[in-house]
Amino acid sequence: MSEKTKYIFITGGVVSSLGKGIAGSSIGLLLQRRGLSVCHVKFDPYLNVDPGTMNPFQHGEVYVLDDGSETDLDLGHYERFTGVPMTQDNNVTTGQIYNTIITRERRGDYLGATVQVIPHVTEEIKNRLRKLERVDDSPDVIIAEIGGTVGDIESLPFLEAIRQMGQEEGPNNTMFIHVTLVPYIDSAGEFKTKPTQHSVRELREIGIQANMLLCRSAQPITEGLRQKISLFCSVPTRSVIAAEDVSTIYDVPVKFHQQEVDDIICEHFGWELPQPQLGDWAAMVEKINDPKKSIKIGICGKYVMLKDAYKSIIESFVHAGVANDAEVKLIWVSSEDIKQHGPEKFLYDIDGLLIPGGFGERGVEGKIEAIRYVRENKIPFFGICLGMQCAVIEYARNICNLSEAHSYEFYRELKHPVIHLMADQEGVTELGGTMRLGAYPCELTSGSKSEVAYGKAKVSERHRHRYEVNNAYRDMLTEHGLILSGLSPDGRLVEIIEIGEHPWFVGVQFHPELKSRPTNPHPLFRDFVGASVAYHEKRTIELEPEASKRD
Ligand code: GLN
């Protein structure tokens, strides 16, 4: 709609992990619902070119896009909230900026000039922003989030670049929103505004005056406190927003709207737009907060300690829970514990088991044990990527009697490498850039559980893996009852496996969690949760036949 793309810059102060990504996504959703086209970008101040090679233990999950780029998990929030598909241009790292500049310098493009952070690095950062402005349907607003915390050495070039953008574009075309912490000090019985004052001042020293503050706190901050923060930080009281903890991240846009965040932004940019329609969104939040049923899903993986490593999976269960009117309680089980103590001890009262993706051999035997347990006990199972590969190994070992079946990822000298590299991948040894990454089409077998779930015959899903089901074992697996219900259009790659004689046993080579949205849950997650609800109800009746009759 607008003639000129506007910029909203989101920075964070005091501590990390305040939810800048969710704040930005929520603002994006509100503006989108007022009729604007929104584009998000995340600037990550680390030197890695992308997070693909980073340990998910430290960095959280790697979020893969359709175009195959490996990006920060905040892009997952942007896509989930706005539904706008991202590309590699929407995640910019210091590593990428330096890569571009050094390549140019070696080529002699700088014509003898001394290459410096200011202006060369800051120019390149601004170029990346302006590139987004130039995409086909030039967005009405670009929401740029600067990773890290104000005061970090590595985020300084980004802050300097957005300060320059503020100058060049002018105050009517740029807005600075700062996410800050207002801690409650128990011993004093008070909220403290000093950390916020300091971080706003630190921004000002760089030359950026915040236009709005999103004050993160455990409890809502009072009107008096907002006035105090307003006074010290030179931000109008109306623009000092209480952003207290909420029971679900999807409530954040609703809470922001109640405090007129979107009205303030529209007024700032001179937009006169209708109020956003949030009925479906609010209904979804209500369902999350007040589910009628409750089930337990076991998740068996290696990174059981860091939930950010499974961000999209956790969110997908929230979405699937809404569709089934059920609370999905996730029970994190270490695959090494299962290996040591057996699956029964940990899985006896779960209603479904999910084995997520992963790399490396640690914990694989425990996962295979867990899969055997749920297959034999007819408990719903969903295997994703490595989880699907483990299901194939389990099936080969225990149903096809190939006791030495395993994946070529873990052992090179194998009698039965049921999971292997594709012929054209062999010999590729370098770490980055050798995986099957991004969106690939998949054709579904008619009448399979997958086809029933999707309700169509051809789908596109995102991948991130090196190994595949070994075609040399296909006949043996299918003769023993395994259903290959999803294949690549040329038939060469197995994308989905199922077991027929089981309430719900599906393994997928791709990552469905990357495509689930709160108001549009992924069909496989939705049906897996549906099957787990059915299993739960059946089990409850078997355990307590009298009680269920009384209901
Ligand atoms: N490690 C396996 C592979 O590379 C699975 C990867 C994954 O689960 N994302 O094929």
Image (tube, rainbow, N blue to C red):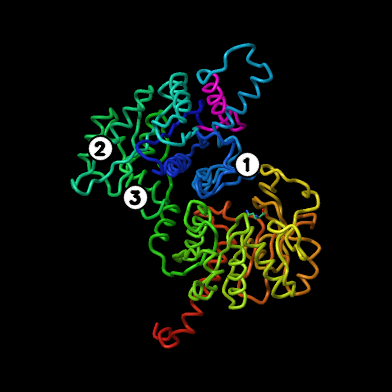
Up-down: is 546 above or below 200?
A: below
Q: Which residue is the site of mark 1?
A: 69
Up-down: is 270 above or below 454?
A: above
Instruction: Name the residue at the top extreme.
Output: 112
Q: Is residue 166 or residue 74 the one in the foreground?
A: 74
- Residue 182, given in percent of the width and then of the height, sits at 29, 41
Q: Which residue is the site of mark 3?
A: 245
Describe residue 90's horizontal placement relative to residue 477 as left or right: left
Q: Which is nearer the N-term, disc 2 or disc 3?
A: 2
Q: Which is nearer the N-term, disc 2 or disc 1?
A: 1
Residue 121 painted magenta? yes
Residue at 45% x, 87% y is 545
The local crowd at label 2, few if under 14, some if 14 to 19, many if 20 or more residues have their Cα within 10 Å, is: some
- Residue 298, given in percent of the width and then of the height, sits at 51, 67
The local crowd at label 1, few if under 14, some if 14 to 19, many if 20 or more residues have their Cα within 10 Å, is: many
Q: Secondary structure at mark 2?
A: loop
Q: Which residue is the site of mark 2?
A: 193
Q: Secondary structure at mark 1?
A: loop
Residue at 44% x, 52% y is 281
Pointer 2 with pointer 3, Cβ within 8 A: no
Q: Mark 1: which amino acid?
A: Ser
Q: CA distance from mark 1 to mark 3?
A: 32 Å
Give the position of the C terminus as an image quadrant. Answer: bottom left
Quadrant position of ligand 1: bottom right
Describe residue 55's horizontal placement relative to residue 465 as left or right: left
Point out the stretch of residues depicted in magenta.
Answer: 120-140
- Residue 398, given in percent of the width and then of the height, sits at 69, 75
Residue at 43% x, 23% y is 163
Q: CA distance from mark 2 to mark 3?
A: 17 Å
Question: In front: mark 2 or mark 3?
Answer: 2
